[in-house]
């Protein structure tokens, strides 16, 4: 078993416990006072790409890439000559081939392209309270960064202020808030995507959105996620709210209307209730029936007027993966997000997260194989986004290269949420009268933040770039969490530019699977990517034998 390092002394980061492969702590607390790599990136931005204490220290790698199978066991190739993907205004001179000239913008879509400044998107931020509480930071940060943000499932169903008549939405203030917050700073890059599960479909979420917002919103059908193989969940600690959710038609466990449960709640033996969503496709018994149902759902969305439709699928086995790819291709969907096991943003059963489904690298390797098969048959493959445990710029490159040329985005679940938490905590210190509204946890700045400064303009590397973008007067309306998210996205973009320049690729479409090598034989077997000393060996022998 791989033992991930807890501290990275080179860049000055610390995890609370043994981190995940992504570098995030296994349990990410919104009140955290620091300082994993994502946490610190949210303040320092691209400065965190380099070791600390420059001029007084030297540093060396501490990677464990030769052990085990995962994205960590892939290595990114560098090349000693050439330059690919230069735009028409550049020459192949060393003065033009600077990493800052690498274009990391991307787009996805079948007939209508959605442009993104950075090839990343958020995971689904749905009915969990943490998504609701920090939405201003997430949505504004995504809009400013020019990346897609996903409104997850059940947002209308759990909203006490929403109004449903005969099971159909008439009023949805929380969903409205989420959509309108993003569009407040949307400038043509990124998108807002709204998911639908069983309950959302029954409630008429798509009809409501089309009637109120038209075709500006992208609709996403959902088959599952990488964190669990059952429906979405939240926990509530109010008996009244638990009854409200049950009355809305949800499964609530334990049953809040049971006299035994009510008595246990009053005595505090039970302190919370879990609200569950339903499993989809339980009335279907074959791949062909799934296809028919799926095509009917897509046709309904198109009839309503939606021109951009996507699908999110989870860490199921190979049959479901093949169905997702082929049916998305046949339906001419704009994006397919494939989420590997181990991901997640919300409240998944812990051992289910640990033990169900196909891990990301194996699932994504097979997804490439299936996409390639369809392409060879002359079938247009949908644009792909890989998800499942990504947080850094090397993850961006590896995931894009793993699925190249089909992969256009990398979906990050937990990582982009950390800037929202951190910024809100800092803003609550400077604006104590708004602390409760911001869901800030701190009364004073912790030492890890004080190291960077005493006032916001000094603490946030993203402050001045965001001010330049929105204007001095508008800065008062920008959540600090959004400023932190902008810095995090900028760090990832800059790090990706550096990896791409080293691989002599100056635009994303030039990234290739040949840019990856396997650091051990097990990874080679799983991914089909050559072992590192065998990649390019034929070319090497030609030189030596010439």
Image: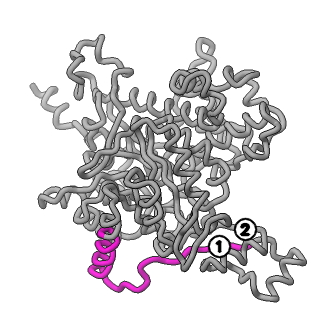
**Residue shown at 60% from the left, 62% from the top:** 127
Residue 18: mark in rendering = none
Identify the residue under disc 2: 236
Relative image position of residue 271 (x, y in whole percent): 81, 71
List x then y, in percent, for residue 530.
28, 46
Q: What element carries label 1?
A: strand
Residue holding disc 1: 275
Q: Quadrant of residue 350?
A: bottom right
Could you classify mark 2 by the number of other residues whose Cα lies within 10 Å: few (under 14), some (14-19), or many (20 or more)? Answer: some
Could you say where residue 208 lies in the image, as x and y percent from the top left? 47, 64
Do labels 1 and 2 touch, CB within 8 Å? yes
Residue 419 rendering spot, x and y as whole percentages? 61, 39
Q: Where 320 falls versus 111 (above or below)?
A: below
Q: Which residue is drawn at 30% across and 11% down?
A: 95
- Left or right: 135 with respect to 300? right
Instruction: Name the quarter where the C terminus is drawn.
Output: top left
| Picture residue at 17% right of the left edge, 56% below the top | 375
**Which residues make up the magenta segment?**
273-299
Q: Which residue is drawn at 36% across and 32% down?
A: 104
Going from N to C along the chain, the mark reached first, 1 or 2, is: 2
Quadrant housing residue 211: bottom left
| Residue 294 is one of the magenta-drawn residues | yes
Distance from disc 1 to disc 2, alpha carbons, whole Å, reads 8 Å
Q: Residue furthest bottom?
A: 259
């Amino acid at each position: 078993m791989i033992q991930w390092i807890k501290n990275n002394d080179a860049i000055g980061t610390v995890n609370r416990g043994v981190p995940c492969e992504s570098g995030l702590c296994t349990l990410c607390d919104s009140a955290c006072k620091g300082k994993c790599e994502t946490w610190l990136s949210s303040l320092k931005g691209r400065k965190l790409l380099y070791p600390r204490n420059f001029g007084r220290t030297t540093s060396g790698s501490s990677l464990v890439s030769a052990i085990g199978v995962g994205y960590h066991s892939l290595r990114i190739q560098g090349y000693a000559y050439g330059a690919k993907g230069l735009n028409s205004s550049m020459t192949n001179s060393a003065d033009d081939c600077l990493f800052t000239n690498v274009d990391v913008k991307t787009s996805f879509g079948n007939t209508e392209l959605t442009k993104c400044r950075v090839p990343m998107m958020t995971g689904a931020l749905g009915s969990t309270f943490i998504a609701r509480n920090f939405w201003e930071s997430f949505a504004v940060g995504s809009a400013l960064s020019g990346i897609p943000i996903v409104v997850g499932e059940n947002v209308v169903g759990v909203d006490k202020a929403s109004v449903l008549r005969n099971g159909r939405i008439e009023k949805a203030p929380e969903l409205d808030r989420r959509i309108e917050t993003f569009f407040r700073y949307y400038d043509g890059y990124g998108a807002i995507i709204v998911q639908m599960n069983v309950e959302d479909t029954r409630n008429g979420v798509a009809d409501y959105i089309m009637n109120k917002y038209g075709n500006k919103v992208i609709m996403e059908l959902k088959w599952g996620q990488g964190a669990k193989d059952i429906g979405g969940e939240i926990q509530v600690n109010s008996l009244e709210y638990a009854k409200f959710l049950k009355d809305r038609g949800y499964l609530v466990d334990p049953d809040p209307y049971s006299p035994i449960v009510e008595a246990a709640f009053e005595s505090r033996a039970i302190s919370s209730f879990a609200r569950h969503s339903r499993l989809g496709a339980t009335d279907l018994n074959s791949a062909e029936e799934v296809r028919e149902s799926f095509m009917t759902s897509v046709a309904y969305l198109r009839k309503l007027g939606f021109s951009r439709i996507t699908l999110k699928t989870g860490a199921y086995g190979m049959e479901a993966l093949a169905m997702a790819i082929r049916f998305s291709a046949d339906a001419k969907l704009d994006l397919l997000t494939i989420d590997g096991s181990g991901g997640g943003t919300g409240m998944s059963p812990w051992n289910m997260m640990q033990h169900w489904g196909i891990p990301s690298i194996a699932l994504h390797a097979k997804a490439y194989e299936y996409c390639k098969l369809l392409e060879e048959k002359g079938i247009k493959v949908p644009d792909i986004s890989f998800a499942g445990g990504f947080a850094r710029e090397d993850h961006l490159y590896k995931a894009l290269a793993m699925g190249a040329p089909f992969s256009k985005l990398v979906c990050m679940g937990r990582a982009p949420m950390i800037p929202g938490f951190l910024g809100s905590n800092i803003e609550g210190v400077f604006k104590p009268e708004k602390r409760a509204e911001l869901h800030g946890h701190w009364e004073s700045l912790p030492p890890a933040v004080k190291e960077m400064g005493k006032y916001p303009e000094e603490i946030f590397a993203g402050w001045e770039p965001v001010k330049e973008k929105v204007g001095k007067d508008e800065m008062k309306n920008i959540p600090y969490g959004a400023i932190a998210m902008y810095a995090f996205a900028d760090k990832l973009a800059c790090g990706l530019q550096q990896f791409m320049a080293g691989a002599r690729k100056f635009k994303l479409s030039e990234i290739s699977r040949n840019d990856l090598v396997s650091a051990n034989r097990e990874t080679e077997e799983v991914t089909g990517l050559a072992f590192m000393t065998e990649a390019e060996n034929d070319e090497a022998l030609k030189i030596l034998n010439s």
